[in-house]
Image (tube, rainbow, N blue to C red):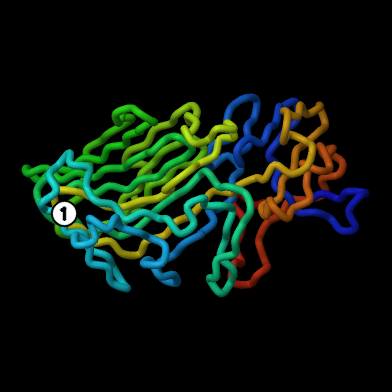
Amino acid sequence: VARLAREAEPAVKRVLGLPFERVQITHGDVWINGSILRSGEGHSPLVTVFDQRWHDMARVFLVAPTELELWQRGEAEWTLHADALAAGSGGSFARYAAHSNLADDYLDLAHTRIEGSFPANDVVVECDVLATGDGARTALRLSEQGDVFELALTHSPDGSAKAQLTRTQPGAEPVVLAEAPLAFGAGAWHHVRFSNRDNELGADVDGRANVVRTNYERNVLHPGDQLREGRSIGVRVAFGGEAGTFRFRGLRILRDLTYTPRGAHATNDAQLLGSDEYFLLGDNSDHSRDSREWGPVIRSQIVGRASCVVWPPARWRWLDRAVE
């Protein structure tokens, strides 16, 4: 909580830059001293942009016309009959296409999507999946700029399973980034979350965090990004599989907090903070007045620490690491 002479009321903001640090906002992310600020380092909760409980999947997920006969699309779940698609065939995918740019949208209290205006690069997809068939390969895909990342969960005939993360860049073959054995029995429902957040890929399965994970340094540009703006073009989220039958339900898409490049501080060039300066940012970035416009805030202007969220009542919660 900071009290600023230019504001009528104290402002509640998130402290992301500390004294002597160099802060820069690039493609919606915060970079500190030339390194991206990773998940868990002062970040807010993820923001939901699609939830099957309240939204019609058929309105936002598309299947190629040549593959429609493989999909049975119901209100509660979608089933992919891909037994005839051999391993390595590329499989069949349902693609999130209605809002492919994935801007800094959010859901209001009535679960209506409120459109944003600035692209959100960091995305998370989660769902329940039930796969059957020896060699069945469930796949979730996320793209950012010119990269396509895939989480594949493969059942082996001997009953074992494997989780694998791959990265595909324009004109190149997929590269395996990480893989690990997985207790993922066929014929049962499993909850899977695949995240690409702050150049960190991770998969959670049935509540087990990071069963497979890896970091990467930077994204490559998309061939269609002729102005070299770091845009993410095309399908951002997809789910599907090959060599088995797959049932999907409870699908959600979430995004990371995205900082828009408004204001003159730390948006074009890095902002070097002095010995008594802090860089403060608001969570509703597109409508927030903060250090992007004010500039750094000195220590004497910080008058308290927020401990909980009280409005709206439906989102009341204690904040992590809150102190009295």
Q: What residue type is labelled 1?
A: Ala
Residue depicted at 51% across the width and 50% down the height = 101
Work out which residue is located at the far right of the displayed protein and give it.
5
Which image quarter: residue 157?
top left
Q: What element carries label 1?
A: loop
Across and down, in percent, residue 106 comes to 57, 61
Q: Is 268 placed above or below 309 here?
A: above
Which residue lies under the disc numbered 1?
82
- For label 1, count other residues whose C-alpha is less than 10 Å away and answer few (under 14), some (14-19) or many (20+): many
Residue 63 appears left or right of 231? left
Residue depicted at 67% across the width and 45% down the height = 260
Across and down, in percent, residue 303 comes to 83, 49
Q: Is 262 placed above or below 199 here?
A: below
Residue depicted at 15% across the width and 59% down the height = 187
Across and down, in percent, residue 127 comes to 34, 58
Residue 178 appears left or right of 300? left
Residue depicted at 23% across the width and 56% down the height = 67
Residue 65 appears left or right of 312? left
Across and down, in percent, residue 280 comes to 74, 43
Q: Is 251 placed above or below 300 here?
A: below
Camera-side residue of 279 and 105 = 105
| Label tally | 1
Residue 282 appears left or right of 31? right
Q: In which quarter of the image is the C terminus?
A: bottom right
